[in-house]
Amino acid sequence: MAPSPHEASLFDRVKQNALTPKNIFQGLVLGLLAFILTPRSEDIVEFKPFQRELGDTKNTINLHTDAYSRTNVLIPSASTTENTTVNLAAWLYEPSIPPDAAAKPPIVVMAHGLGGQRDFGLHKYADAYARNGFAALVFDYRGFGGSDGEPRQLVSPQMQLEDWEAAITYTQSTELAPKVDASRLLLWGTSYSGGHVLVTASKLGEKIKAVVAQVPFLGARHTGIKSTKTRGLSASIRLLMAGIADKLASMAGKSPMYVKLAGSPGEVAFMAMSPEELHAYKAKQPAHKQGGWRNMVPARFVFEAPRYNPLDYLGSIKSPVMLISAAQDALCPHEVVAQAAAQLPGSELVTLDCDHFSLYLEKNWEYTIKKQLEFMRKHASEEDALDLGSQKTEKKDIKSEL
C-alpha cells in the first residue's frame, strides 16, 4: 500500500534531517558526553552501601589509669529528631584530681582530619593532655568510627562543623557540669579539622580560650591546583565524573559510589601522595579499625570540597591560636599556614622540617606536644588569658631543631 501524502511528507522530512552535519555533530557530542560521564569501573571502589561494623575494638574501650579515666560517651548530633537518634561517639578523658581541688579542669575538644577517626592516633594526644590536668572530649564525625550516620564515611564540611557544634554543646551539658570547667574551653584540630577549629572559633568568639591547629587545611583554592597536578589531569577529570555520577545516584535514592580517599599519583583519589607519604599515612591507623573503616569516601565530596575555605574566617577569630606547620607539606602548604599566622594577632607559628604525615611520627610528636601543652596551659588559666584587644601582636615562628 502506498503511503499517504502526510506519511510521505513526514518520512521525507526525517530522511532529509537525519544525516545533516549539524545532527551528526550533535550526535557525536552526546555520545562523547555519555562515554565521559560513565565512570570507569576501576575508579569506583564500591557501588553498594558501606556496611558498618558495630561495637568497640581493643583501641576504643574504656580505660582507667592512675592519671585519668577514659569513658565512651554518646553525643546527640544535628540529625537527631524526635523519631530518630543519630549520636556521635566520643571519648571523655577525666584527669585524676584531688576531691578537694580548688578548680575543675579545663576541657579540650578534639577530632581528626579528612576521613580520619578517633582510633587513628588521637589517643596519644588526649593522653598527654589528660596527664597534664586537662579534660578532653575526642569525637568521631557522623558516618565514621563509632558514630551513627549514613551513608558511611561521607565527608561534608558543613556536617562536620555541625558535629563540632554538637560536641561543644555537650561540654556545656548538665552531665559534664560537675566534671569540667566549660568556661575554659579549648579546641584542637589537625589537617582538615585544623580548618574546622578555626571556623568554629570564629563563630564562638571569646567563648574559646585557645586553639591549636596542626597542619591545618585552609582552603581548596590554595591547594586545588597543586592537588590536580599531583593527581594528574586525567585522574582529576575522572574524579569529577565519579562525583557527578554519585551525586545523581544520591538524588535518585541509589547507593553511594565510593572512590579512594588516599592513593598514588594517577589514581582517582582525593589525596594523591608519594609512596613515603602513603606509608606515614597508614602508620597511624590500627590494624582493626572501628566501624570497619575503609580507604574510601562517596565521590560527591568533590562538589562541596572546593567551596570550603577556612582562611576566609580568620578575621573573626578572637582566641589565641597556635598553628603548627610542616615545611615540606604538599597537602596543606607551609606558605599558606604562614599567611594565616600573619593574619592572626597573638598567634604562634611552629614550623617543623617534615611532610604532612611525618608530623605524627614520634620525634615530631614529642616536640609539638610539648609546645602545645605550654600554649594551652598558658591560655587555659584565667589570670593568664590573652587580651587580644589590648595586647600588641606577638608572632613566634619556632623552628624545630629535630
Image: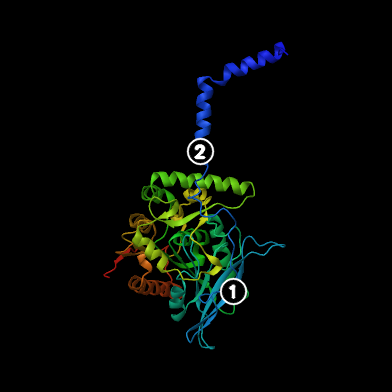
| Front residue (pair 123, 167) | 123
Q: Which element carries disc 1, helix, strand or loop? A: strand
The crowding category of the residue bearing disc 1, from other C-alpha atoms within 10 Å (few below 14, some 14 to 19, many at least 20), is some
The crowding category of the residue bearing disc 2, from other C-alpha atoms within 10 Å (few below 14, some 14 to 19, many at least 20), is few
Residue type at tag 1: Val
Residue 29 shows up from this direction: yes
Give left or right: position of 354 versus 213: left
Residue in the image at 62% along x and 16% along y: 13
Q: Quadrant of the C terminus?
A: bottom left
N-terminal of the pair, mark 2 or mark 1, is 2
| Front residue (pair 25, 180) | 25
The number of numbered badges drawn on the structure is 2
Residue type at tag 2: Phe
User: x, y percentage for residue 368?
Assistant: 36, 71
Residue in the image at 60% along x and 47% along y: 249
Residue extending farthest front: 1
Give left or right: position of 10 versus 132: right
Residue occupied by mark 2: 35
Residue extending farthest left: 401
Residue in the image at 51% along x and 48% along y: 41
| Front residue (pair 341, 48) | 48
Label 2 and label 1: CA atoms lie apart by 48 Å
User: x, y percentage for residue 302?
Assistant: 49, 49
Residue occupied by mark 1: 73
User: x, y percentage for residue 236?
Assistant: 43, 46
Tag in front: 2 or 1:
2
Residue in the image at 34% along x and 70% along y: 364
User: x, y percentage for residue 82?
Assistant: 72, 63
Residue 323 shows up from this direction: no
Q: Which element carries disc 2, helix, strand or loop? A: helix
Give the quadrant of residue 379. Answer: bottom left
